Amino acid sequence: MRLFTGQRAWVVQRLSALLLLVLILLAMLALPFASPLDFSAWRALAGGALGGPLIALLFGALCAHAWVGMRDIVLDYLQPRGLRLAVLGLITVVLLGVLARVLLSLAMVALAA
Amino acid sequence: MRLNIYRYDPERGDPPRMQAYDVQPEAGDKKLLDLLMRLRVQDDSLSFRRSCREGVCGSDAMNINGRNGLACLTALDGLKEPIVLRPLPGFPVIRDLVVDMTQFFAHYHSIRPWLINDEPLPERERLQTPTERERLDGLYECILCACCSAFCPSYWWNPDKFIGPSGLLQAYRFIADSRDTASAERLDFLDDVYRLYRCRTIMNCTEVCPKGLSPSHAIERIRLALLQRSS
Amino acid sequence: MVPVRAAPAPPAGSYCPRARMDKPPHRLPVFLNLAQIRFPIGAIASIAHRVSGVLLFIALPVLAALLHASLRSEADFASVRGLLSSPLSLVVAGVLAWALAHHVLAGIRHLLMDVGIGSELERARASARLILVAAPALALLLLVWGLS
């Protein structure tokens, strides 16, 4: 049960962490200037040429980071092979679901605009 | 002084239990091991390992009041009573405070703890500059007492696959050695989810090393060496 | 002078065939009662890092669902906004704010330690203590800021 091997997973974890840090910092800097959002402004932001890709990037990094972290927890605490595979599979399905849902929502808004 | 000691007798087959002892330290008793030696006179069934009694052989590693340490280096002054002694956490207990270190040493063997250099032997020894020699400081002093590995949660969960802080410190000791020519193979061997990358930099290892070494620092250097190699 | 012989090359695959790396076959007791082990401050920060990560993982599908709903229609947007201002979600938001604050701070600490900054024991202890205190404070700040 190796999946992603040693160094590659470690690098994915660190790079996604750095990306998330940058995105969080960006959001913290931008938020004070944002006016209270109404529905149309929110849709315009998420469907925009900047907002959409940034949200997609955020969730992509989030999912990659979460996958490596959850895999580490599984490798530490769950020893039986079958249980490991089942939980790892479940985690993967959940994260792919999150990613699909976010991308779909963004595509929906972008196409409507 | 009052002590509370983990007892296990494999011949009796009873589960392990804690036993209370009272022992009077005498003038000149400075370390926990001095007290344990007096205890052994009182109760000769009590088992623990010890040899050099000065922190060089690494035999008397145990869990002292919840932290791993060497009995011979632990000062009696400042130890909270009752002094609770248990075997090294996560290691199979053979009897009382004596644990089975087979697996620990197998990991040590796996990193090939010897100099590898196939170049023709020089007339005398393989020389190092003082700077090259300095790189081994903080690495070669490890006495393999297992205080660190037995305090590492990652080693507790995967003792059969994770090399553990002690073995990784030893691995870096040879990677850092200017006379060793097998660094690439050594790094190849370590690049593995289990062998190296189970470490989460908790630093429990460095916290308890009785020799004041930093396995976590060695692991950090191995990861950087791997990163440098692949970029 | 006696020539020094280099150690023979070990057989490929297994360096020490006699050594046993798998779990010992005989059943011996193992002492591993975590309540009886005194954990250093770094271990506390580390387990909190792990717990906060799991909390954030659990929040992720909810976050995706909220994002989806808030973009779907005016009415769903309003109901998401209503949901977020309920008292229950305040508690949830508080816990998640801590999880985010701790996970980010502990993550920065680890990234710095990866490149050798603050990885000496004394400084690692100090930074562990710092993030354990700073995370709840930052969470409170986030929460107050979010409410205003």
Image: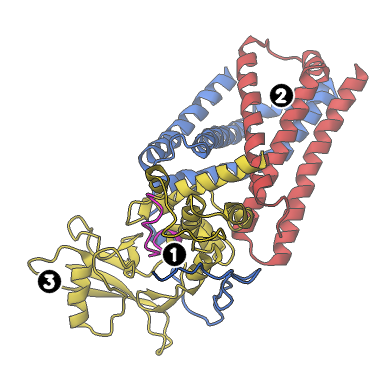
Chain colours: A red, B yellow, C blue
Q: CA distance from mark 2 to mark 1?
A: 46 Å
Is B192 situated above or below C145? below
For marks 2 and 1 on the same chain, the one whose residue lies earlier in the sequence? 1
Residue bearing the label numbered 1:
C33
The numbered disc on residue B24 is 3
Stretch of the chain drawn in magenta: B137-149
Mark toward the viewer: 2 or 1: 1
Label 1's element?
loop
Pointer 1 and pointer 3: residues touching (CB < 8 Å)?
Answer: no
Label 3's element?
loop
Label 2's element?
helix
| Classed neighbour count for the residue bearing mark 1: other residues with Cα under 10 Å, few (<14), some (14–19), many (≥20) | few
The residue under the point 71% across, 34% down is: A61
Q: Main secondary structure of the magenta part?
A: loop
Q: CA distance from mark 2 to mark 3?
A: 70 Å
Check the residue under mark 1 and report the chain it is in: C
The numbered disc on residue C81 is 2
The residue under the point 79% across, 48% down is: A93
Do dots 2 and 1 share one subunit? yes
Whether residue A85 sits left or right of residue C8 in the image: it is: right
Percent coordinates x, y for residue C7 in the rendering: 52, 69
Mark toward the viewer: 1 or 3: 3
Is B137 situated above or below B13? above
**Amino acid type at mark 3:** Gln
Whether residue B224 sits left or right of residue B139 in the image: it is: right
Pick the quarter of the image with the N terminus of chain B: bottom left
